[in-house]
Amino acid sequence: MDSWIIWLILAAGLGVAEIFTLTAALGLIAVAALLTAGVAALGVPMGLQLVVFIAASIAGIAGVRPIARRHLTQPPSRKFGVPALVGRPAYVTQEVTARDGRVRIGGEEWSARSYDETLVIPAGATVDVIEIEGATALVYPRD
């Protein structure tokens, strides 16, 4: 059997393994095996094929590793979902007390409670969202 066929089989096997593991390392090695299959099809001796495979594997991993590390160490650039609501202004649509109330946050109607249990916030006031507990916004009036 020709060596390029073996390299193609190895590349396909590593590619399938990459699909199931999602590690990216096996995918990079599969690409190196595919590159080596191309070199082997040109008739390069086995020793040089191994050198090409090792060099391509190292180059792929060395090229991707800094990018992966940067993505793992950087915090997300933007908050989204419920945590993104904390700190936003809200408009009181129904009087907010320590027990209940309604506010509009960015076009959505939320149930609300006063962050300070002694406060009663009238309808029409602008408040800041201090915290979200479940589906209830804890709010505090703006100065």
Image (tube, rainbow, N blue to C red):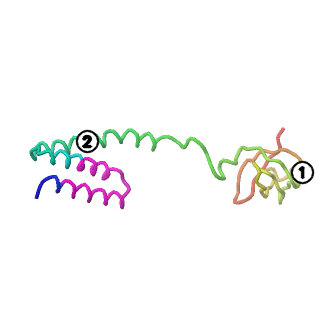
Q: Residue at x 21, y 58 (%)?
A: 9
The residue positioned 38% from the left and 56% from the top of the image is 22
Question: What are the residue bounds of the magenta stretch?
Answer: 7-34
Quadrant of the frame with the N terminus: bottom left
State the mark number for residue 106: none
Between 106 and 140, the one lying in front of the other is 106
Query: Crowding at label 2, few (<14), some or many (≥20) Cα neighbours within 10 Å?
Result: some
The correct choice, above or below, for 82 with respect to 66 in the image is below
Measured from the top left, where is residue 109 in percent x and y? 78, 56
The answer to whether the residues at label 1 and label 2 have Cβ atoms under 8 Å apart is no
Secondary structure of the residue carrying tag 2 is: helix
- The label shown at residue 58 is 2
Residue at 25% x, 44% y: name it.
Answer: 57
Residue 86 is left or right of residue 10, and the answer is: right
Residue 138 percent across, percent down from the top left: 76, 52
Please state which of the two labelled residues, at mark 1 or mark 2, is closer to the viewer.
Answer: 2
**First in sequence: mark 1 or mark 2?**
2
Q: Find out whether residue 23 is within the magenta segment.
A: yes
Residue assigned mark 1: 123
Mark 1: amino acid: Ala
Q: Give neighbour class at mark 1: few <14, some 14-19, many 20+ (Cα, 10 Å).
A: some
Task: Please report the residue visible at 62 percent of the width from the left and 49 percent of the height from the top.
Answer: 80
The residues tagged by marks 1 and 2 sit, at their Cα atoms, a distance apart of 64 Å
